[in-house]
Amino acid sequence: MSAVLQSAPQVLALDRARIARALARRQRYKYVRPRVEREGLGWKVVSPNCSRSVDAAGGEIAIAWLVPGSNGQWLLHARDHAQGCWVLKASGLRLDEALGRLCADPKREFWQ
């Protein structure tokens, strides 16, 4: 049990690094620098709102929340700014699949 607890911070740091690296390759708003921070059991992606559709001043907004589940599967949430809550967009994904959806974002569910 102690080996699992000792490796947990390293695993979390690796997940954060993978998310940050993937965000650098996204297709929308390539010129902004989002950041990744802890949110509950997962990782929240925060980015300047360049389109000013959510924050007229262009301030930082939460855009996605990635939460690890069982068996290496992840939940991907988008932020509903009008309601002030997270909305589940996909579940049962590998981290690379979740990041692919977040970075491509063809329906503009995340990068607004």
Image: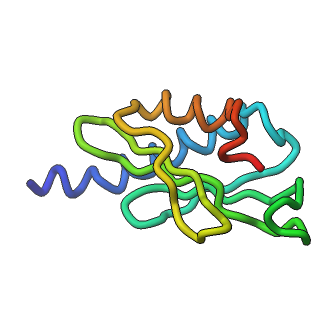
Left or right: 50, with 89 as reference point:
right
**Residue closest to the far front:** 83
Q: Choose between 13 and 85: the one closer to the eye.
A: 85
x and y, in percent, of residue 3 in the image: 16, 50
Q: How is the image coloured?
A: rainbow
Residue drawn at x 41%, y 44% is 75
Residue drawn at x 83%, y 39% is 30
Residue drawn at x 62%, y 44% is 20
Q: Choose between 85 and 63: the one closer to the eye.
A: 85
x and y, in percent, of residue 63 in the image: 65, 55
Left or right: 48, with 77 as reference point:
right
Q: Which picture quadrant has residue 22?
A: top right
Left or right: 24, with 32 as reference point:
left
x and y, in percent, of residue 92 in the image: 34, 34
**Residue closest to the far left:** 1
Vertical arrangement, residue 98 with respect to residue 84, above or below: above
Counting every numbered tag in the picture gives 0
Left or right: 1, with 77 as reference point:
left
x and y, in percent, of residue 24 in the image: 72, 38
Residue drawn at x 66%, y 35% is 103
Q: Quadrant of the N terminus?
A: bottom left
Q: Choose between 98 and 23: the one closer to the eye.
A: 98
Q: Which picture quadrant has residue 50?
A: bottom right
